Each structure stands twice: as structure tokens, then as C-alpha cells.
């Protein structure tokens, strides 16, 4: 059983004219797996992350589907019943530490608050654990006595990660944790995350618009477009053999240090308005491979080994290649 | 060197705190550079490097505390009152959500500079406005004229901001982190647009302010790397990116996310600042974070030495290139 199982999850904003931000998403996160979730602004990646943690707030609401974490069906539970599991099983790190930390309370107070709510640790144990998590993220111990405004942006973000680690949760959801930071600070946090993953076991759902950052860290990458999963692959496979045209375009839009950078391009056009029904493939209007079949019916999410892709053009082509490779088409069970 | 269009000499900006007892902050410390006609100079650095303040001084938003700015040899002490200079330098801001007046239509936003600087009236300006929208690839132009900023996406808004900067037909565009607030895919589109505008000579010279060395590689001929208000390295873009000399430039380069290099980069981790708040007045500003730090670095500020190929580095440890 996976640590996290999401089944056919859909999330809408508003009631009269609902916008379906997450459309029928199913995914699994295994124990000790680092999963990257990428897509443009408005693709529903943050909405999905919040819904998995059951932190969706009106006007957002889960209209169908289930979220199962540790054999508990989170979507069937009441908010109060979820409280003991927050921080303990699932912790979340938000885009900027400044939004996540309480500005009028010291870091020490906020750390202690989490531990008092969830454990029966003594003051001594609480302090020891506070120091321990600060050491893990490379923040000097005297930061504990400080208030958020006394820390730099990078420090605050690391404190937020430390806070998420306090109760050793099995899953940490990170929503754009390095987006508002400088390159060098981002690098420090990324290296720190890599180190933490070597030292202890926990799963991460890392939400970002920056495929470069995600590919560097994640075991597996899920690409979202217009509220749906369009591709899911192991990182190195995704980098070298992207299947969906959208993933390919995202990779092309990454500036590359080695190549002559003048060859890169963006993705023209804009994502569809999810307030209206999407007919056919949502990416078709921006896709250079699109054919008439793409605009008539919605493509299925094809399973190819451990990978998934939602594209009738490249999906079949990759499918065929792999079957041929698997032994001249003799083995048809895919 | 070709004809210099803009020359900054020992430009300095000191911000004095309004709170008593707080020491003044030197945001820009004796920075000199020259921008030639037809060239793109990138100012690269992290937050607090002074790169934005330099841009704001050149456009007259801030007055320099000390130093000189010259436009084609004419000294400009107060850029703001000089309408001629005002037209010649236009700015593209970082935040496309804040840079446009939400109450004005796109047509009005773009008509103002055409009327103010090019002497057109509102009727004759309309052709020019349509042309501008087409230049930044907001087509068909007519469908954008009556829109207001909230109806546009971030990338579209940034295109409007770029069109507004082009509207005055300036000699120099100062682009302050024009893509850092945008998604990676949209970012590539806007960079591509800036690149094409430069190729087509719609924009002649540009000062490109960024924290992202890779985008500088795409656009700039020359790069100046700033750290805490000081120039630490300067030279041709390919030289700087191909062979960074200053420890800080190396740190910046090694920080770029690179999925093709997944192994841990221990180099960046060793660059942790000893103490972030310590302000060094005497020595090298990078000394507290520098892996090559020597005794002299704490006492004496390294000079920016230029070699014969136009490359300059301010560092005691690596010396003259």
C-alpha cells in the first residue's frame, strides 16, 4: 500500500459558475519517495497539494474522489479528527516562510506550540528537538529566540522546513519553497534537502513551476496541465525521453548552461479557461503535433510501464516503440 | 570600444535610515561602467547587490549620493527634470502586476508616452499604438486596446510594459528583472521577445538587471557582477560564463539548477556566510563568505583591475587575470 493514494480527485472553485481546477487526478506517493509536481500558474498544482493535505478552503471544495494517507481516508474525515494527523503525518511548507510563520511570535514559541499540541514531550525534550531540526537545516541555534522579521528570506524558509520536520512526518508537501528566493539561497536549500533525504526517510511532494529545480531533486515527476496529469515519469526518463508535447515544450523553455542558449523557446498561447468545459485535449490549441482527433475527444491517461502519458499522438508512438523493444511484439500485455 | 551612450563614474548611493542610531547603508559603492550604442550590459547580483538602485538612479527615480552620469558626454545630475534624457531612457519593471495602472486601458497606457514624447496627438498616436502591440506580439492589436491589466495574464502584462517602454522610442531600455516574476515557460517567451527586439534593432541598447546569469547569457554582450554594492567582476559575457574568476561569480554559476548534474555540489554549501549582518567597511565585501579568504581581504578592499582584454576582477586571492 502506498503512503498516499489519491483517487479521481476533483476540486472546484465557486458554486454558481464553478471552475474545475483539479480534474479527476489519481496518483500515488510511496514511502520515502520524492515526487515533483510541475506545471504553469493556474494548472491546479497548488490546489491539488492543498486538497491532499485537506487544507482546501472555500470557495475551493473537493467535489469527488478520495485521498488516502496511511490507510486513513482523509476525504471522509472531519476537520477536528484530522488535527492529530497534521504535522505528525503530513506537514506543509509554503512558498514564503513569511506567510507561514507567525510574525508576532518567536520561532521557539512556534516550534513549541507544534510539539505541545501533538506530543507529551518535556520542555527539555522540546528544546532539544528544536535545536536538532535547526541543525538539520543549517540555521544557527540562536535563531530560536528570534522573530520572523529578524531573519532573512532564506533563513525563514529553512526555519519553515525545520518546523515541518519537527514531528518526523512521513510526508512533507512543499509548495514552491524556493520560488521567492535568490539563486544562491535556493541552491543552499536544495543542497540541504538532498542532505536531509540521505539522513532520514520521508516522502516529499514538491510543487514548482521550475522543471529544472524539480528534475534535480525528484525521483519521479508528475506534469500537470489544465487540472489534469498529462505525464508521470521517473526524473531521468522524463529529462531524456519526455513523452507529452507539453513536457517537451517545458524542457525546451529551460535555458541551458551548455548549449547555445539562443535556441530555446517558450510555449506560445495560454492555458484554457477551466470555467468552461474543455473539449478534447486541453493542450491541443498550443500543441505543434495536434490533429483533428485531438480536438474531438479527451485523451486517456495511458499507462506505459511505470510511466503515464495523456496524449494520443506521442502516447501511441512511445507505446509501439516499447512493445517492439520488448520482443518484436510477441508480448502484447502492456 | 564604440561610441559610449551612457557613462557612469564612481556612482554611489547611500541610504540614511530615518530611525535614529541606525547606520546608513551604502547600496551602491563607486560603481563605474559604460554602455555603448548597440550593446547590452547585464548587471548581475543577488538581492541587496545594488543592481536595482543603479537602474533607479539612471532613470532618475533616485538621485545619486555621489558620482557622475553622462549621456553622450553631457552630464546629467538630475535626470528627472531633463525631459530629453527622460525620453531616451525607459524602464521595464520587475512586477507587471504593479507597473500598470489598473484603471487605464492598454490603449491609454500606450498612448501617453507617444503623445508626451513624440509630439503626436491622440488620433495620430493610434497607429503607433497598434504597431507597438504588434511589435510585442499582442495580436490582433485591436482586441487588446480596450482591455485593462486585470484581463491579461502576467506574460501579456509584461509585454504591455515592454511596449510602453518602446513607445517613447528610447535609446536605452533599463530592464529590471523583467522575467523573474513569470513562470518558466512564459519567461522563455518574454526573453525570446527581448532577444528578437534587440536583433531587429527595435531596442538599441539595454541595461539588463537580473539575478539569473543564464538569461544574461542569452541577451547581454557584457556582464557586470555586483556584490553588496561593489563591482566584483566585469567582462564579455562569454568570458565571464565560460571562465568565472571571482569566487562570487563562481558561486553564482554553480547555484544554477542543472538537472543534468544531479551530484551534490559541495562548493555552494561551503559558501555559507559567517555572519549575515556583519557590514565590513574596510575590506572585501565578500570576505565573510569567501572560501579563498586571506588576511589582507579583511583589511584592504581589492581594486578592480582591468587586463588587456577588458576583463576586470576585484579580488586579492585570484589576482589580476
Image: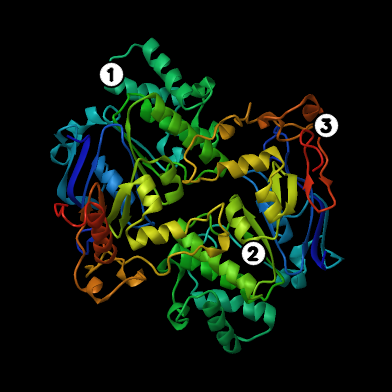
Up-down relation of residue A265 to residue A330 (above or below): below
Mark identifier at residue B300: 3
Question: Within 10 Å of the Cα at label 1, are there few (<14), some (14-19), or many (20+) other Cα atoms?
Answer: few
Residue with the mark numbered 1: A119
Mark 3 lies on a secondary structure that is loop
Badge count: 3
Say whether residue A11 is visible: no
| Quadrant in the picture for residue A127 | top left
Marked residue nearer the N-terminal end (3 or 2): 2
In the image, what residue occupies the spot 36% across and 70% down?
A286
Mark 2 lies on a secondary structure that is strand
Q: Position of residue A309 (x, y in %)?
A: 26, 56
Give the spatial CA distance, label 1 vs label 2. 54 Å
In the image, what residue occupies the spot 54% across and 38% down?
A185
Q: Position of residue B192 (x, y in %)?
A: 54, 66
Residue with the mark numbered 2: B91
Say whether residue B218 is visible: yes
Amino acid at each position: 500500500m502506498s503512503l498516499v493514494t489519491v483517487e479521481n480527485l476533483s476540486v472546484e472553485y465557486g458554486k454558481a459558475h464553478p471552475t474545475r481546477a483539479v480534474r479527476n487526478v489519481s496518483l500515488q506517493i510511496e514511502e520515502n519517495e520524492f515526487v515533483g509536481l510541475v506545471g504553469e500558474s493556474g494548472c491546479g498544482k497548488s490546489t491539488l497539494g492543498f486538497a491532499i493535505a485537506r487544507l482546501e478552503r472555500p470557495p475551493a471544495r473537493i467535489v469527488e474522489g478520495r485521498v488516502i494517507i496511511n490507510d486513513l481516508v482523509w476525504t471522509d474525515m472531519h476537520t477536528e479528527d484530522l488535527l492529530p494527523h497534521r504535522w505528525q503525518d503530513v506537514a506543509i511548507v509554503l512558498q514564503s516562510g513569511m506567510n507561514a510563520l507567525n510574525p508576532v511570535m518567536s520561532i521557539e514559541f512556534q516550534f513549541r506550540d507544534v510539539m505541545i499540541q501533538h506530543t507529551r514531550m518535556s520542555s527539555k525534550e522540546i528544546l532539544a528537538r528544536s535545536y536538532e531540526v535547526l541543525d538539520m537545516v543549517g540555521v544557527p541555534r540562536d535563531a530560536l529566540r528570534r522573530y520572523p522579521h529578524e531573519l532573512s528570506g532564506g533563513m525563514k524558509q529553512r526555519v519553515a522546513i525545520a518546523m515541518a520536520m519537527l514531528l518526523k512526518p512521513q510526508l512533507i508537501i512543499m509548495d514552491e519553497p524556493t520560488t521567492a528566493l535568490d539563486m544562491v539561497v535556493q541552491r543552499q536549500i536544495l543542497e540541504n534537502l538532498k542532505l536531509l533525504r540521505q539522513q532520514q526517510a520521508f516522502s516529499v511532494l514538491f510543487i514548482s513551476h521550475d522543471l529544472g529545480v524539480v528534475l534535480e531533486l525528484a525521483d519521479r515527476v508528475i506534469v500537470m496541465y489544465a487540472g489534469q496529469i498529462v505525464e508521470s515519469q521517473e526524473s531521468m526518463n522524463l529529462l531524456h525521453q519526455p513523452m507529452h508535447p507539453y513536457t517537451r515544450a517545458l524542457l525546451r523553455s529551460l535555458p541551458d548552461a551548455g548549449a547555445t542558449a539562443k535556441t530555446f523557446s517558450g510555449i506560445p498561447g495560454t492555458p484554457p479557461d477551466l470555467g468552461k468545459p474543455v473539449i478534447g485535449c486541453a493542450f491541443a490549441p498550443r500543441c505543434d503535433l495536434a490533429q483533428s482527433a485531438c480536438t474531438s475527444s479527451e485523451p486517456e491517461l495511458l499507462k506505459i510501464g511505470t510511466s503515464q502519458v495523456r496524449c494520443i499522438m506521442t502516447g501511441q508512438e512511445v507505446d509501439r516503440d516499447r512493445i517492439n523493444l520488448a520482443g518484436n511484439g510477441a508480448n502484447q500485455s502492456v | 570600444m564604440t561610441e559610449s551612450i551612457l557613462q557612469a563614474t564612481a556612482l554611489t548611493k547611500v541610504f540614511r535610515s530615518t530611525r535614529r542610531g541606525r547606520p546608513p547603508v551604502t547600496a551602491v559603492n563607486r560603481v563605474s561602467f559604460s554602455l555603448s550604442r548597440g550593446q547590452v550590459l547585464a548587471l548581475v547580483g543577488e538581492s541587496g547587490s545594488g543592481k536595482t538602485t543603479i537602474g533607479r538612479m539612471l532613470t532618475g527615480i533616485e538621485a545619486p549620493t555621489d558620482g557622475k552620469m553622462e549621456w553622450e558626454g553631457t552630464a546629467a545630475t538630475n535626470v528627472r527634470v531633463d525631459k530629453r534624457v527622460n525620453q531616451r531612457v525607459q524602464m521595464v519593471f520587475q512586477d507587471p502586476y504593479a507597473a500598470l495602472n489598473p484603471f487605464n486601458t492598454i490603449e491609454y497606457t500606450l498612448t501617453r508616452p507617444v503623445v508626451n514624447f513624440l509630439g503626436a496627438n491622440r488620433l495620430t498616436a493610434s497607429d503607433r499604438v497598434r504597431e507597438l502591440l504588434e511589435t510585442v506580439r499582442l495580436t490582433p492589436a485591436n482586441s487588446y486596446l480596450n482591455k485593462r491589466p486585470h484581463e491579461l495574464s502576467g506574460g501579456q502584462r509584461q509585454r504591455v510594459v515592454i511596449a510602453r517602454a518602446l513607445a517613447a522610442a528610447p535609446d536605452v531600455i533599463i530592464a529590471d528583472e523583467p522575467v523573474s516574476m513569470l513562470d518558466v515557460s512564459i519567461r522563455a517567451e518574454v526573453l525570446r521577445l527581448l532577444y528578437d527586439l534587440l536583433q531587429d534593432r527595435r531596442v538599441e541598447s539595454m541595461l539588463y538587471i537580473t539575478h539569473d546569469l543564464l538569461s544574461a547569457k542569452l541577451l547581454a554582450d557584457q556582464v557586470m557582477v555586483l556584490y553588496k554594492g561593489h563591482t566584483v567582476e566585469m567582462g564579455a559575457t562569454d568570458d565571464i560564463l565560460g571562465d568565472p574568476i571571482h569566487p562570487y561569480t563562481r558561486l553564482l554559476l554553480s547555484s544554477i539548477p542543472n538537472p543534468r548534474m544531479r551530484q551534490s555540489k559541495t562548493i555552494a554549501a561551503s559558501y555559507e556566510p559567517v555572519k549575515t549582518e556583519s557590514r565590513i567597511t574596510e575590506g572585501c565585501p565578500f570576505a565573510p563568505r569567501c572560501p579563498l579568504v586571506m588576511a589582507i581581504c579583511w583589511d584592504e578592499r581589492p581594486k578592480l583591475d582591468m587586463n588587456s582584454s577588458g576583463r576586470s576582477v576585484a579580488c586579492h586571492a585570484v589576482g589580476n587575470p
